[in-house]
Amino acid sequence: MKNKSAMITIAGRPNVGKSTLTNAIVGEKITIVSHKPQTTRNRICAIVNRKDCQLVFVDTPGFHKPRTKLGDYMVNVVKSSIADVDAVILMVEPIANVGIQEKELIAQIKAADVPCILVINKIDTVEKESLLSVIAAYQDEMDFEAVIPVSAKWHDGVAELLTECEKFAVEGPLFFPEDMVTDQPEKQVMAEIIREKLLWNLEREIPHGTAVEITKFSERDDGIIDLEATIYCEKPSHKGIIIGKNGQMLKKISTMAREDCEKFMGTKVYLQTWVKVKENWRDSQYLIGNFGYTNDN
């Protein structure tokens, strides 16, 4: 039996549920999620093997109007991820109005001449009858290969989406080995898990101004992982908030992160964290690249 494969980009505005869908598709957590916009900063490949077919889903940052060089990088990731793929999933909210971000994405998809599936997420939050007007609004903008309502949070519609995506698979070698579920190095996954806990526990702008660098990642003979991480923030006042009174906030963030790191690695993890200030790093091309946000991702 010959192998078939397809590369499919998931695109949409911030907080529409792209990363939640990516995790639901793979069946395990490989990309971080939070209630804050612009959680995802890099393109992340999620790999699904189904019989003779390999589907590679590209989770992208939310498409938005950038305000920093980091924001510029994130938007460029989205644009480049729409080109040279077998299909695009345009993920939208169940609202009967096509927003500016969606119209811009549709224009880019049309320009790339790539087939597109419309996925309407969060259907668990609305009456099913209201979806008809949502579908009509989007079909006025573009001819979609399929329209699939889903609830990424509850995995509703995910099986139907995977079946539809298989139609875009073409014969040829697999993109990745069959035992891989993501293209992200383990160090990068660990850094992202720590950043997720910052997003969950810190308010306002502070978590958006943070980056995480793994400075030590080593495995002992008994399989235990020793992990050391530095959290960078933009202001000394932010450093104090991240550490918290008597170090309680940093301890909480580190404990939550360690638990998720252990789930991902399947072994015991010893995690040490530090906090340092790098003012205005989001507008420094050098520091953006140094923290792993490069065009190679």
Image (cartoon, grey):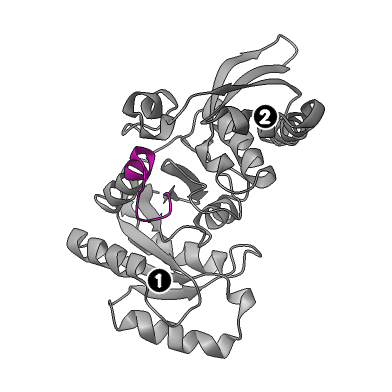
Q: Nearer the viewer, mark 1 or mark 2?
A: 2
Q: Please, is residue 159 above or below residue 204 in the view?
A: below
What percent of the width, then of the height, locates residue 238?
61, 33
What percent of the width, then of the height, locates residue 177?
46, 34
Residue kind at label 1, given as amino acid type: Leu
Please report the residue visible at 72 percent of the width from the left and 34 percent of the height from the top.
253
Look at the image and give the residue range highlighted in magenta: 60-74
Left or right: 111 with respect to 207? left
SS of the residue at dot 2?
helix
Dot 2: within a 10 Å radius of its alpha carbon, few (fewer than 14), some, or many (20 or more) residues?
some
Say if residue 80 shows up in the picture: yes
**Residue beneath label 1, please?**
118
Looking at the image, which is closer to me, 222 or 10?
A: 10
Query: Which residue ends up furthest to the front in the rendered image?
Result: 237
Please report the residue visible at 28 percent of the width from the left and 78 percent of the height from the top.
141
Q: Quadrant of the C terminus?
A: top left
Residue kind at label 2, given as amino acid type: Gly
Q: Please, is residue 107 above or below residue 48 in the view?
A: below
Please report the residue visible at 37 percent of the width from the left and 49 percent of the height from the top.
5
**Residue beneath label 2, please?**
240
SS of the residue at dot 1?
strand
Q: Please, is residue 55 above or below residue 95 in the view?
A: above
Cα–Cα span, label 1 and label 2: 44 Å
